[in-house]
Image: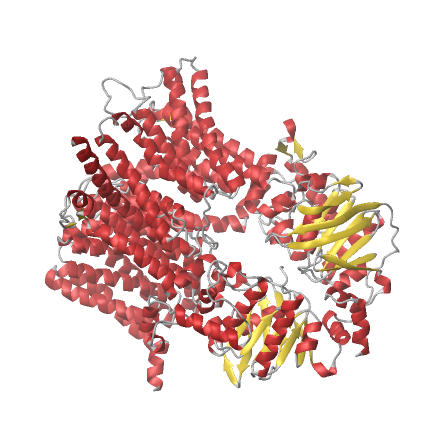
């Protein structure tokens, strides 16, 4: 792949001039943090996303992919992070989808008419099942071809995804975060399988953010950061700590000026909290922590380790299965979002488009969301009516205080830039004089200026004696802002560190599920 | 007024006056785009219906002329027809503001109507109280009929499109039973399924002329009330928040379930009010199947009015005008009144997919630009697209006429129509296979023309050749400019 | 002795009526199944049936051959469905609004054409009916029940089998199911979501049109204004109640057809005349059953991707949303 660039709508450059060389038969690791552009790059290679510029060359031939179909035909197969499987269908049906085998002989007929006729001839499920069973056996991946996907465990579902690529005779295999959903045993099995593929001469590209995997498996490792290629290294020539450094960037400079924290009383107290996600899996497994007034407690961790559900449980958006949450001594477990707000908790949600803002609403309408039902914004008998002038006044005030760049407070927030949108959220959440602020990924997708502004605002709130729980996937942000850092992995707080006494690598390893002893080990290699 | 982008300092003290606000609203790009969509849909549907008229042997010029004349000269009839549509349109629009599709307004209307009728003829009450009570009861029953699907949606997840539709038919059957058996008027007209006439005390008096009654006042008051509810009350704010972004509303402490149930309840109430108002003001009794689809038309009106209360008012008046003008069109130009229903259906189809208008506009724009910069391939291409489109409609149309004389010719015309449409669909967005499709279509037209001259007379021949020959010419001209890949490969080999 | 004969006669008559009444429902519901399994809501079945019913009579009237009528109904239903499909799939329009438009258009168009072709309102001229297939089984009961039915009735039942085969045994069916459950997966497998959905919608219109033809030239012999009379919606109810499967559609269609036949049967049974007054409630049963089914008393699972227009690049989570 040469000079691949991709810009998404809204001028987000996900890939900037990336050139990758991957040799036949090698296992190539693609390492990077969330949002570094790994998946985008590989989706381009699989034909799912179109590229803006650059060339893809496979075995000396330049190829142009109009869709996954073209990629499949030259032998590229991809195992997606979120499986492309249809739960109510059987294993066989999922595997053959798009490449259905037809009863004897017809398969070989070519031509447009036959392509259409084939669509209504019976699929030869028997031969398909046989082939699937054969592929499975060959690679030591036992599976029942007639089982329905929804009855299979996640590990088995991944097997189906891999079998799907093998069924299409792929010899370039892309695996997107294959271990993120597996248990340790399943990971070991997967590695054995991948080793077999490697021995069979297949090319494997492994996308991951965990350090351990490329070290075990890969011949070469390329590191991406912010859509750019940082470098490609041989496994033999590198160490986990070097990779961690490449992945997270420079040694952190403390760019935010702040006074030492003056922690006061405990504001937020969480005891042994358990939360299930919408699929019914336990994703928060016994988290206990406390946040004091006047301090920022940072939760570091790779996304998908239970942070979202933890925040939702605190703010009343999701019911905890067990455990207790108190704010200033009031038990808020099981309260609804409005009640939680009323005890003085404000929440900067992780996805401002999904939760934080109503995009078609005006700025004035957005800045009152959550307090619209209370005076002075609601007036009249039983506070049933809205005082629109108050809306505007409040909006203008906040626009002024937080220097949000807008032409008018009546325009829909969708017309604002991301930074200004986030400022609207922050302004709204901090204007209610909270005791506790839950800030989830508060600077995601923002430019340097807006990020700095929000960081300074959070520090200022802290200095005013407000307790802040900061959840972020960006290590720099956590290290810059937090007075205490809790590292979350697999729904558990695995360590609590002082930002001044820990290193980037140590946190990186903890986030990837390694103990501190692994760091020593890695250093000794 | 020019747009000031990115002004940091807003005068905190200054409040905008109403006029500036309205001006800004009118200048809003989104609103303009919406207006373009609506207007475009109306124009497109009039165009298509004109072609259908040509095919059916009517004169679209005369039809549209008398449609307009009829509408302009009878403003009272427009308002008469518009009155119930305003209310049912508001009903659909309000639910839609909360992200819900109430397609069962028809049933809520029937329930409201029967409620108002029962109060109207069973109870003897003083003059002012009687209609008010009847309307209240009517809308209350409508509320209940709307609340059922609302609650089912909120707490059981039953999709409101299906439940409102099914309840609608249930309501129609239930009221039919009521007026056929227990509430049926006995005596002279016993063969009609209808209730006795309501008391005079319950009648909504006429406001102006023989048509417009106080129902209009109620409807306009409802527009104001719904506008106020949506924009000025906490409930309206919450409804809109749930409709626009349920997750954000929940995050903001709003209970989405409660609001969904309420929205459908109020929506049902408005439809019920429409039913009551029609009985008290227009029909004076409940006859089985009395409504000419007012609930369905409410969907059209709401969609056309972009679910905005004042837009609904405008949409209802537009359809009222179509009805009023339609009568004149029927009487003078002898075009069947059903034409109005057809136009209405076409408008909804086009409004359903604003992207059609965008697609036409975008491609048209690119044609306009290219006609200036490189007129040679652009102009024949555009003409080819235009002829193809017209050919498509004519092919379909004459198929109906010619089927009577000769089915083979009919099928040939049908094929010509289909290929012409395909030709348009390929040529207009400048697909590489467009010219080939145009050649195919022109071939079929010419063949149909020649065959038609033999079996059906010279007119068909003229039609076929008039369409086919220019298409061939343009297509050949274009083939020399950009060769389709199909021909290129042959040339290379 | 007399009593037994009446009962037997009534039972056989009820079976025949059930088959007749359920034919259009089964056909339209099967059509709706293809559309909805592929992820496109089709509340326009009513309109497609109506235009099918009209076209069948018109083509029969012009050609004198009712089989041409059948062909015309299939073509007309398919064309109207194609418009719905293009609006919903290519132009990403709102499925419900478009479906409403289809219903209104069909109602307007057929009544207009009724006047254009025959110059009268309400009813068309009588045309040749599709000849029934009749045979003698030698048994009075069987003869009355099964001996004489329209070929379309047979087609409907064959269609159930064919639909089952297409949906569960062919590549096209597999793709339809995939498009309805998770279009992004279908896309990633290399097949076209847009084509799959559009074709499925066209098939739905063809089947609904055939259902309409049964009403006008299979069961009756003329077209009447609004003659489908809400059957498209009952078909939708049958589809939901049948849980979007061919067998379910067959059973639900038969059951709703049976209810329909029952209200006529009531009038024939001595001693049950008083029940006549309550036939409206029998007619309500399909509608109410669907509401009950959707409210979760009986589990009802629509395809996951239904009513969601599939937009290509959206499926890839943007790493940073800006």
**Residue B208 seen in the figure:** no
Q: Which picture quadrant has residue A103?
A: bottom left
Residue C71 at x, y percent in the picture: 22, 56
Front residue (pair A114, B430): A114
Question: Residue A114 vs residue A427: left or right?
Answer: left
Question: Residue B21 vs residue C110: left or right?
Answer: right
The number of callouts visible is 0
Question: Residue A483 vs residue B348: left or right?
Answer: right
The residue depicted at 60 percent of the width and 39 percent of the height is B255
Q: Which picture quadrant has residue A316?
A: top right
Question: Residue A341 vs residue C124: left or right?
Answer: right
The residue depicted at 65 percent of the width and 45 percent of the height is B251
Residue B25 at x, y percent in the picture: 55, 44
Front residue (pair B280, C70): C70
The residue depicted at 75 percent of the width and 53 percent of the height is A287
Front residue (pair C259, B18): C259
Classify B138 as above or below A42: above
Q: Which picture quadrant has residue B178?
A: top left
Front residue (pair C148, C312): C148
**Residue A198 seen in the figure:** yes
């Amino acid at each position: 792949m040469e000079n691949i660039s991709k810009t998404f709508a809204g001028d987000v450059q996900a890939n900037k001039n990336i050139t990758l060389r991957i040799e036949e038969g090698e296992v190539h690791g693609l390492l990077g943090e969330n949002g570094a552009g790994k998946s985008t790059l590989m989706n381009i290679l699989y034909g799912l996303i179109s590229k803006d510029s650059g060339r893809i060359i496979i075995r000396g031939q330049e190829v142009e992919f109009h869709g996954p179909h073209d990629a499949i035909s030259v032998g590229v197969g991809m195992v997606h992070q979120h499986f492309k499987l249809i739960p109510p269908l059987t294993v066989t049906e999922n595997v053959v989808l798009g490449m259905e085998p037809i009863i004897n002989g017809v398969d070989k007929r070519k031509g447009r008419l036959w392509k259409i006729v084939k669509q209504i001839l019976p699929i030869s499920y028997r031969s398909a099942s046989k082939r699937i069973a054969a592929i499975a056996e060959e690679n030591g991946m036992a599976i029942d071809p007639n089982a329905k996907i929804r009855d299979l465990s996640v590990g088995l579902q991944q097997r189906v995804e891999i079998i799907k690529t093998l069924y299409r005779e792929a010899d370039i295999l892309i695996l997107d975060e294959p271990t993120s959903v597996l248990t340790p045993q399943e990971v070991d099995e997967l590695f054995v399988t991948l080793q077999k593929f490697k021995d069979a001469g297949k090319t494997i590209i492994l996308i991951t953010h965990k350090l351990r995997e490329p070290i075990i498996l890969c011949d070469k490792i390329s590191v991406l950061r912010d859509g750019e290629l940082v470098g490609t290294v041989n496994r033999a020539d590198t160490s986990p700590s070097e990779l961690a450094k490449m992945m997270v960037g420079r040694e952190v400079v403390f760019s935010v000026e702040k006074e030492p924290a003056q922690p006061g009383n405990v504001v937020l107290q969480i005891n042994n909290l358990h939360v299930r996600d919408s699929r019914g899996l336990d994703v928060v497994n016994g988290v206990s922590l406390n946040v004091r007034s006047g301090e920022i407690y940072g939760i570091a961790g790779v996304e998908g380790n239970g942070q979202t559900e933890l925040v939702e449980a605190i703010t009343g958006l999701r019911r905890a299965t067990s455990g207790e949450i108190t704010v200033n001594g009031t038990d808020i477990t099981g309260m609804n979002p409005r009640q939680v707000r009323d005890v003085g908790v404000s929440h900067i949600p992780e996805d401002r488009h999904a939760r934080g803002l109503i995009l078609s609403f005006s700025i004035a309408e957005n800045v009152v969301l959550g307090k619209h039902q209370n005076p002075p914004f609601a007036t009249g008998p039983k506070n049933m009516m809205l005082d629109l002038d108050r809306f505007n006044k409040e909006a203008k005030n906040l626009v002024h205080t937080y220097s949000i760049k807008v032409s008018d407070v009546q325009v829909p927030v969708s017309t604002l830039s991301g930074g200004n949108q986030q400022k609207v959220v922050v302004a709204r959440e901090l204007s209610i004089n909270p005791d506790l602020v839950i800030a989830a990924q508060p600077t995601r997708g923002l430019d340097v200026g807006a990020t700095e502004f929000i960081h300074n605002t959070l520090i200022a709130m802290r200095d005013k004696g407000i307790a802040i729980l900061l959840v972020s996937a960006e290590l720099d942000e956590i290290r810059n802002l937090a007075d205490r850092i809790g590292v979350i992995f697999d729904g558990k707080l695995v360590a609590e560190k002082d930002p001044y006494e820990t290193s980037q690598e140590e946190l990186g390893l903890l986030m990837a599920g390694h103990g501190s002893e692994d760091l020593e080990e890695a250093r000794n290699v | 007024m020019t747009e000031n982008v990115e002004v940091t300092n807003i005068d905190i003290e200054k409040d905008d006056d109403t006029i500036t606000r309205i001006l800004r609203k009118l200048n809003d790009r989104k609103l303009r785009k919406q207006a373009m969509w609506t207007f475009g849909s109306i124009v497109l549907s009039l165009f298509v219906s004109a072609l259908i008229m040509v095919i059916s042997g009517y004169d679209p010029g005369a039809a549209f002329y008398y449609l307009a004349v009829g509408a302009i000269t009878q403003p009272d009839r427009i308002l008469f027809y518009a009155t119930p549509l305003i209310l049912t349109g508001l009903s659909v629009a309000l639910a839609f503001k909360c992200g819900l599709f109430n397609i069962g307004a028809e049933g809520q209307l029937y329930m409201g109507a029967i409620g108002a009728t029962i109060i109207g003829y069973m109870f003897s009450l003083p003059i002012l109280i009687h209609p008010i009570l009847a309307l209240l009861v009517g809308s209350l029953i409508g509320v209940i009929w709307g609340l059922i699907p609302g609650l089912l949606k909120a707490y059981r997840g039953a999709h409101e499109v299906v439940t409102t539709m099914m309840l609608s038919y249930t309501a129609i059957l239930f009221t039919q039973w009521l007026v056929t058996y227990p509430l049926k008027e006995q005596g002279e007209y016993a063969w009609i399924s209808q209730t006795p006439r309501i008391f005079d005390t319950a009648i909504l008096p006429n406001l102006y002329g023989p048509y417009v009654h106080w129902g209009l006042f109620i409807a306009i008051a409802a527009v104001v009330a719904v506008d106020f509810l949506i924009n000025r009350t906490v409930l309206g704010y919450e409804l809109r928040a749930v409709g626009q972004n349920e997750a954000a509303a929940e995050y903001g402490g709003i209970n989405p379930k409660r609001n969904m149930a309420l929205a459908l309840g109020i929506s049902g109430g408005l439809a019920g009010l429409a039913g009551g108002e029609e009985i008290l003001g227009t029909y004076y009794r409940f006859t089985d199947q009395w409504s000419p689809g007012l609930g369905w038309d409410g969907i059209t009106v709401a969609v056309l009015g972009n679910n905005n209360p004042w837009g609904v008012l405008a949409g209802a008046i537009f359809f009222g005008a179509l009805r009023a003008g339609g009568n004149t069109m029927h009487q003078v130009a002898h075009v069947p009144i059903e034409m109005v229903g057809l136009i209405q259906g076409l408008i909804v189809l086009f409004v359903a997919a604003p992207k059609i208008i965008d697609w036409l506009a975008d491609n048209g724009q690119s044609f306009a630009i290219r006609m200036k910069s490189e007129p040679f391939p652009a102009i024949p291409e555009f003409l080819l697209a235009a002829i193809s489109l017209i050919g498509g409609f004519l092919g379909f149309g004459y198929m109906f006429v010619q089927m009577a004389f000769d089915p083979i010719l009919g099928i040939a015309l049908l094929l010509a129509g289909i290929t012409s449409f395909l030709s348009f669909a390929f040529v207009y967005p400048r697909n590489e296979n467009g010219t080939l499709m145009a050649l195919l279509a022109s071939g079929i037209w010419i063949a149909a023309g020649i065959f038609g001259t033999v079996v059906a007379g010279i007119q068909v021949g003229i039609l076929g050749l008039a369409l086919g020959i220019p298409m061939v010419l343009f297509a050949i001209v274009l083939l020399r400019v950009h060769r389709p890949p199909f021909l290129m490969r042959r040339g290379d080999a | 002795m007399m009593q037994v004969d009446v009962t037997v006669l009534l039972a056989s008559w009820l079976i025949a009526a059930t088959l007749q009444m359920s034919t259009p429902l089964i056909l339209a519901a099967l059509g709706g199944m293809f559309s909805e399994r592929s992820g496109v809501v089709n509340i326009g079945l009513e309109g497609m049936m109506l235009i099918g019913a009209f076209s069948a009579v018109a083509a029969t009237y012009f050609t004198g051959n009712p089989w041409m009528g059948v062909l015309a109904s299939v073509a007309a239903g398919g064309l109207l469905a194609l418009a719905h499909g293009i609006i919903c799939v290519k132009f990403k329009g709102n499925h419900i609004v478009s479906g409403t438009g289809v219903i209104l258009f069909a109602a307007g168009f057929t009544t207009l054409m009724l006047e254009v072709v025959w110059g009268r309102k309400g009813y068309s001229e009588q045309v040749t009916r599709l000849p029934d297939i009749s045979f003698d089984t030698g048994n009075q009961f069987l003869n009355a029940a099964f001996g004489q039915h329209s070929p379309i009735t047979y087609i409907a039942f064959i269609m159930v089998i064919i639909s089952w085969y297409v949906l569960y045994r062919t590549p096209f069916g597999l793709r339809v199911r995939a498009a309805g459950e998770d279009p992004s997966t279908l896309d990633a497998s290399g097949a076209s979501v847009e084509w799959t959905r559009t074709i499925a919608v066209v098939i739905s219109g063809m089947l609904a049109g055939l259902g309409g033809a049964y009403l006008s030239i299979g069961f009756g012999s003329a077209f009447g204004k609004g003659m489908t009379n809400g059957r498209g919606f009952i078909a939708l109810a049958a589809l939901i109640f049948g849980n979007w499967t061919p067998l379910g559609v067959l059973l639900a269609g038969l059951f709703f057809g049976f209810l329909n036949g029952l209200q006529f049967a009531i009038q024939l049974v001595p001693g049950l005349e008083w029940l006549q007054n309550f036939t409206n409630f029998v007619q309500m049963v399909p509608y109410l059953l669907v509401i009950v089914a959707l409210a979760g008393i009986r589990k009802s699972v629509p395809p996951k991707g239904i009513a969601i227009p599939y937009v290509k690049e959206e499926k890839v989570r943007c790493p940073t949303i800006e």
